[in-house]
Amino acid sequence: MTVGRRSFLAGAGAVGAAPLLGATAAQATPDPAKKRKVRTGAQVLADSGWDPLAGQRVGVYSNPTGILNDLSHIVDAMHASGKVNVVAAFGPEHGFRGSAQAGSAEGDHVDKRTGIMVYDAYGANAAKLQTIYAKAGVETVVFDIQDVGVRFYTYIWSMYEAMVAAAKSGLKFVVLDRPNPVGGSADGTMMLPGYTSGVGKEEIIQQHGMTVGELARLFNAEYLALDTGGPVVQDLQVIEVEGWKRDQLFAETGLPWVLPSPNMPTPDTALLYPGTCLFEATNMSEGRGTTRPFELIGAPYVDYRWAEALRTKNVPGIEFREAYFNPLISKNANKLCGGVQVHITDPERVEPILAATHMMIEAKRLYPDFAWRAENPPGRWIDLLTGSDRFRTMFTAGASAEQIVAAWQPDVAAWNARRAQYLLYKGGNR
């Protein structure tokens, strides 16, 4: 009888089964936390006994990604320790406990587990946050949320508004740093004046290649004084990640992946998101309402020809498979969509914005129904996501993917030089 590997392993772990030869019982069931290569800023803080927060009234920005090695949430652990006086928690887009979909939050409420008041920080400006800080008596603001390394992922802008409010209120600001899951490479277009929005409040590049701690340093040095009329955060502390190099992807950290948002289920999703999120600006589904958002892309008008055309492009680190799916929510909900699944074959070589550019160009060439999503003016969302009208105008004019990508290389070079003084972690850019 042939026994499959999965069946064999399941049998080896059954009640009464002997451990594998040469292994002790402890070796057969290792503690995953001991195998992790890095310690997040949150874990470093917890391992200190929470000493940097002793004697302070603390407000914590977090979501389900704010975990420690034992998978407990940092606010729950702070509260249980009795050593941190958490007087308020703040939830970003999707909420403090992560129950809300894209563009939504959980609202103000009392957290059932801890009894701590949770304030909705999604879309909240600095003036509103200042009022909340004063009402709750916050003295120190703590930020602990896993970012995914892209300008249009809204958590960094929640941090920015929190910092502006802290600067105006004269409060201490502590960032518990976490790895950038897509590594340290920068790519894409720089946002220009006139294109700021909730998905880009200040002029940074599309795939910024920084951690939230590094971004906090840049924000404090370059932007806060402009928004506050002078004050910056005088006491900004970044508790750094230990054991991480900036050329490491998330899979190399040994850390568990917790969904940063409902449509970010895997590290592969995060690797593709800087590019495939651009399909939000089209009438195609970006896979929301499926189990592989930002990996399944398509529309009712798409057929096998798209996958065939994309396979000829030899996009680094990626292969395209013809796929059919029926999204349950968002664009094209409950409609059969033809399209592709984007498969990562070499994570070290993935260029997601280049891949998405090829995908859009071929979709426009093959299908007359391809269009920007319905809005006024048409194409406004692609401009906000890419940070200017350059991508859209070159795309509409028929430029090749190579020409479009070449146009933003000066942006990347300038960004790499500009950000250098704020970087905290060594290691080359992949």
Image (cartoon, rainbow, N blue to C red):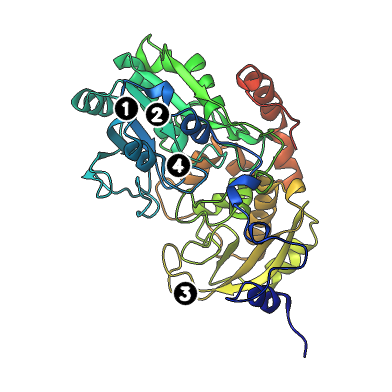
Whole-angstrom CA distance, mark 4 to mark 3, is 36 Å
Sequence-first disc among 1 and 3:
1
Disc ID at residue 280 = none
- Mark 1: secondary structure: strand
Q: Earlier in the sequence, mark 3 or mark 2?
A: 2
Q: CA distance from mark 3 to mark 2?
A: 43 Å
Q: Which residue is mark 1?
A: 58
Q: Residue at x 36, y 16 (%)?
A: 167
Q: Residues within 10 Å of mark 1 (few under 14, many from 20)?
A: many
User: Pointer 2: what residue?
Assistant: 142
- State how far apart marks 1 and 3 are (Cα): 47 Å
Q: Nearer the viewer, mark 3 or mark 2?
A: 2
* Percent coordinates x, y for residue 231 in the rendering: 37, 10
Name the residue beneath numbered marker 3: 335
Labelled pair 3, 2 in contact (Cβ < 8 Å): no
Q: Residue at x 34, y 20 (%)?
A: 166
Q: Is residue 190 above or below residue 256?
A: above
* Circles 1 and 2: CB atoms closer than 8 Å: yes
Residue 72 image offset from top left, x and y in percent: 43, 47
Q: Earlier in the sequence, mark 4 or mark 2?
A: 4
